[in-house]
Image (cartoon, grey):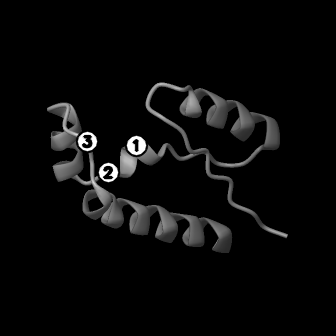
Amino acid sequence: MKKVIFLIGIFGCRKSAIGELLSQDLNIPFFDGGDYHPKDNVDKMSSRKPLNDDDERSWLITLNQLSKSQLEN
């Protein structure tokens, strides 16, 4: 059975470090969700403004599509 693992947590809680270690240990690809934010979200976060549900919607859709495409591979 194919699975996708999402690590979710607050900023700075070492999700990426844990994800990379899991990726190496399980021999599976790792994708950092932060790399998939649209430019508007990055700009907003860079100015220390929190994202709202509307901001995150397109990002979550992108992550969902990435997950589905990886499962096919």
Instruction: Indicate whether 67 appears above or below 7.
Output: below
Decide which of 36, 9 is in the foreground and name it: 9
Q: Residue 57: image x %, image y %?
A: 34, 65
Q: Which residue is mark 3?
A: 50
Residue occupying the far right of the picture: 1
Determine which quarter of the picture holds residue 58.
bottom left
Task: State yes or no: discs 1 and 2 in contact (Cβ < 8 Å).
Answer: yes
Determine which quarter of the picture holds residue 47.
top left
- Image quadrant where one finds the C terminus: bottom right
Q: Residue 60: image x %, image y %?
A: 42, 62
Mark nearer the N terminus (1 vs 3): 1
Instruction: Indicate whether 11 appears above or below 41.
Output: above
- Image quadrant where one finds the N terminus: bottom right
Left of 24 or right of it: where is 30?
left
Q: Residue 43: image x %, image y %?
A: 15, 41
What kind of residue is marked 2?
His
Residue positioned 54% across, 26% down in the render: 13
Say the numbered circle drawn on residue 37: 2
Residue positioned 80% across, 35% down in the render: 25
Residue positioned 25% across, 41% down in the render: 50
Indicate which label's residue lies in the foreground, 2 or 3. Answer: 3
Instruction: Work out how far the residue at label 1 is from the one at label 2, CA to CA, in angstroms.
Output: 6 Å
What kind of residue is marked 3?
Pro
Q: Residue 18: image x %, image y %?
A: 65, 31
